Structures are given as structure tokens and as C-alpha cells.
Amino acid sequence: MEKAIHKKPKHTRFERNRLLTGILFLVPSTIICFLFVVLPVLNVIKYSFNEWPGIDTVPMKFVGFDNYAAVPKTQGFGEMIVSTITFALGVTILTVLVSFIVAMALDKRDKGRINRNLMRSMWFFPCLLGHAVVGILWRIMYHYSNGVINKTIVQLGGKPVNWLETRVLTNFSIIVPTVWVLMGMTIVIFLAGLQSIPTELYEASTIDGANKSQVRRFITIPMMAPSITINVLTTSIAAFKMYELPWFISLGLPGYSTRLLTQRIYFFGFENTGQMGIGAALSMILILTITLISLLQFVFLRKREDIF
Amino acid sequence: MAKNNLNQIPGATTHKSNRIGGVSELASKIFGEFILVVFSLLIWIPIYYFVIGAFKERGDIVKYPLLLTPELFTLDNFGAAIDKMNFFAALKNTGTITIVTLVIVVAFGSLAGFALSRIDHKAFRIYFAVIIALMVVPFIGVIIALIKQTVSMKIYNSLWANILIQAAWNLPFSIFLYTGFMRALPKELEEAAYVDGCSMFRVYFNIFLPLLAPVTATCLIRTGIGVWNDFLLSLTVLNDSYTPTLMVAVQSFFGERTSEYGLAFTGILLASIPIMILFIFLQKYFIKGIAAGAVKG
């Protein structure tokens, strides 16, 4: 901007026209995004500070932070915190770990035997399915007496496992399908990262006599640090946002033990509509959590751009 | 960063194999390959299970979960599922929502991206930062207010509400993509046209638009999959009185106690098959598009 001023002392008519046309070009997207993204965000903030049953004829009553204060007193709050954090942590750790190992195995550098593109597509495929559909599918697979998982266990001589109604185990049961879905993306990002490591690095280390595990330890993993960070952050955001997939699998059961933050927002917003304010306060907690992770990501991405 | 061709980074630079391949190394390679194949097949079991399940009766799905023989094969599920989930009406809804959303997102997104990338002005840079900030907001975080708002705007329970909301939530990403892409295009591209007295819209339409194919492909695939697979918005904004979208319709086979497995699997297959077929033909673009979305957003 400053540079532009120094170069051209006055705005020409041509430039002013250009600016006006440019603004005109932004109008359609601005209207749509303002109406359906910005406005609802402002409204959620407003709801979170008001007491309101959600009916237009009843006026809102400003209550300050009362809704936020009421959140910890809602039934199953402790379980929500535990389940949401276990879910996000479990999904993030497992997804990143598994996809890192798979990406190493799929790396194009060791070209040869089986078509790597086909394999990559195979691992990528699950992330094309809708989350609702995946949830329904896995719930059937987990079924105690009819599901394929217990059927297989019984056939192998084991005892059937109650995947969907056992505390702690069910928290794990909702993590696995989520990893199954998210993995496709993280693998692709890891593969891109692996392929950007210069081949010379590997060659030089081999000449210096490094063995395979040393190469992995001192070249691959440090060079992959940026991709690992990106995948950790994006996967954790995705896990915090996840709604229908874990819901269709466990329905929040047993008790409240797998009911996540997002599912609680839905509950207070659409089922228990008397307490709109609490739903809005929960929404704000989610928005702030995700904003925080995104800020980390943003700072990190900027830093990385400086390096490269 | 996002616009880098994620899967086209030259991976072709393979080792000029300068290591001596001993017998043990060969064995470990074969073993590694074997493990990889086993796991690749394992993660496909859920997909295999539901696809063959769509062609079996409920009892056979339970009895022989992973088998499909000619004796078990049946097409009965399809008729019943198409009937029960009101398939063609749901397909029409999902199709309409997806296509109209894509048109809006590509048209307005590229227009805004053109302005943001070609005009160097402080206000435009701030606007771009706001767009990036909008990409961060989680949809479920505002759904309560959003649905209330559609009611007061009198568009609740209409396809238009669904389309406009989808467009609004996908526009920031497409603006981000288009702006990034066009920033990399040289200035000389348009200068001659302006000297000849072309309007800005002509420059956008005749000179830039034809160059945007790669980024449009990314945008179409990412937005398309997201909108097609959307469940939450369609569930909340299209009320019971409206024929639902495919993803919501599949839910009709799902009860807490009883489940018609055969119908559910057929429903899942019917709802996912268009994307599955497209993927088979456009794998490269799909993977690139999704990965671009993952890096940012």
C-alpha cells in the first residue's frame, strides 16, 4: 500500500474505477457469507448471554455469564469433558500414527512390486463416504449378536464383546471408525511430505554408511516434522467437530459416557429446546476451542513459509 | 501452500539402486509387502461387507457375513430400499442442492478471488483475512442460531435454505483457493487488455476464467463431496414434511433396536455410489482436492 502511494502520487480515475468494480465483485459472496456465517455467529454469542426458551414470542432476558455458569451443572457434564477429550486425543494420536506408518510403506521412492497408486487409492477411499453412512455401517458391524466383528470373534473361538454398551470400551469403539475415515487425508498429506524430501539426502546418508533405522530416525522423521504438525492440528479440529459419525455408532451410550460436546449442542438446541442459552454457551466453548487450535495452525503455517 | 500440487511432487526420482540386494533383504521386502497388502485388505472389509450385504437377505448377512455366493445373491433389497427411502425424490434433492451450490460457489468464489488477487488495496487484504477467519468457524457451533434464523427469514424447510447455507459455508474456502491461484498469475496477462479498453468483467470472463480449470476442479470436488455427504444441515433445515436428502433418507433404515441390515446396506450403497463411481475415474483429482482442503480449513 505504502509503496503504491510512493510510486503513484494520485489515484487515477482508472484505478478508482477498478477499485469500485472490485468491490462490486465481492458483493455476492459478502452478502451470502454475512447472512449465513457471520450473522449466526453473532447470534450464538448473543444467545449465550441471554435466557431464552427459543420461541420468538418470548423476549430474551440478559443474564450475563449465567449460561456459562450453568454448563458444568448440566447432567453428564464431567462425562462430556472426559469423552470429548479422550475422543479427540485418541482420534488424533491413532490417525497420525497409523497414517504415518502407512505413508512410509506407500512411499513412491521404493518403487516396485505392487502399484502404489492403487494402494494409495485403497487407503484413501473410506474418506469419500458420508459420516452418517459410516456411523450406521459401523454400528451394524459392532452389533453384539449379528455384527461381523463378533461373528468373526466367535468363529475364531472367542467370546463376543459388547462393543456398544461397555464403559471405556465404547469410547474406543467410536474412535476406530473415525480413524478409518480420517486416515485417507492424513496419508495423502504425509505422502506429499515424504516425496518432498530430496533424494540426495538419502543418498548421502547411505554413502556415509547409515542403516535403515538410522535413516528413518535422523532424516525421515525430522524432515516430516511439518507434515506431522499439520496433521495433528487438522485431525484434532476434525475430531472436535465430529457429530453424526460417533453418534450413530454409540448414541452417546452407555449413560452419558460417549456423548460428545457436539452432540450436547444438538441436544440443547433441538431436543431440549427450553435451554437455548446453555446450548449456545456450549457452542461458544466449541468455537473457542477450534479457534485456538486454528490459531496454532496459522502461526505454524506462517513460520513454515518463512523457512521454505 | 495449499495450492501446491500435492500429489504431483516428483516422486519419480527413484533410487538408482546402488545397494546390494541380499537374500535377507529380499525376504524382508516381501514380508513388508505382504503385511501392507494384508492391512490394505483389512481396511476394506467394512466396504466389502456392506457392498455384498446389499445383495443378500437379512438372515444371510447375519449367517454368512463375508460371503456372497450365487445362491445368496438377490436384488430384492433394491426395490424395497428405493421404495422405502423414496430414493428418486431424495436423489433429486441431493442432486439439486449439490449442483446449485457448486454453481454459486464457483461463480461467486472465482469472481471474489479475481478482485482480491488483482487489486492491491489494504481493505482487500483485510477482507481476505476475514475470509480465512470464517473458514475456522465450526458449522455445528452455530447451527442453533442458523436454524432459528432460517425460520425468521421464512426460508426454513426449503431447498433454497439448504443451498444458500451450503454456499455460504463453502464460499470462504473457494475464495481462498481462487485468490491464491490467481495471485500467482502474471500481471502482463491483463495489462494489454486494459490498454485496449476492456472492462474488468471482460478481463475476468475472457482471460482469467479459462485459466482456472485446475483450481475449479479442486473446488468442485471438495465442495461437491462435502455437500453430497452433508447430514446435519439437511436433517435440521429440511423438516419432516419435506422429502429428505439421500444421507438423511438412509437413516430411515436405522432404528435403535431393530435394523433391516439388507436395506440399510443397499441404502448406503445407493447414497454413496455416485461419488464412488466418480472417484474411480477421477482418482488423482479427488485425492488432490481433498488434500488441499485438509491443509487449510
Image (tube, coloured by chain):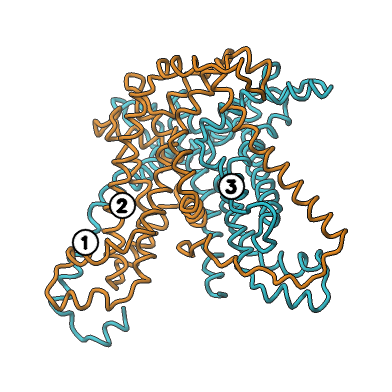
Q: Amino acid at mark 1?
A: Phe
Q: Which mark is residue A184?
A: 3
The amino acid beneath tag 2 is Val
- Residue A31's tag is none
Residue B205's disc is: 1
The x, y position of residue B226, in whole percent, is 43, 42
Could you tell me which secondary element the residue under label 1 belongs to? Answer: helix
Answer whether labels 2 and 3 touch (C-beta < 8 Å). no
| Residue under the point 33% across and 61% down | B212
**Which structural element holds mark 3?**
helix
State which chain is coloured cyan: A
Q: Distance from label 2 to label 1 (Cα)?
A: 13 Å
Is the same chain shared between marks 1 and 3? Answer: no
B220 and A265: which is toward the camera: B220
Q: Check disc 3 and give the amino acid type.
A: Gly
Q: Position of residue A270 (x, y in %)?
A: 43, 26
Task: Same chain for labels 2 and 1? Say yes or no.
Answer: yes
Q: Residue A250: which quarter of the image?
A: top right
- Same chain, labels 2 and 3: no
On residue B106, which mark appears? Answer: 2
Q: Position of residue A79 (x, y in %)?
A: 65, 32
Chain B: colour as depicted: orange
> How busy is the neighbourhood of tag 1: few (under 14 within 10 Å), some, or many (20 plus)?
few
Earlier sequence position, callout 2 versus callout 1: 2
Subunit ID for the residue under disc 2: B
Give me the chain letter of mark 3.
Answer: A
Q: Quadrant of residue A155?
A: top right
Q: CA distance from mark 1 to mark 3?
A: 36 Å
Q: Quadrant location of residue A5? A: bottom left
Q: Residue farthest to the front? A: B70
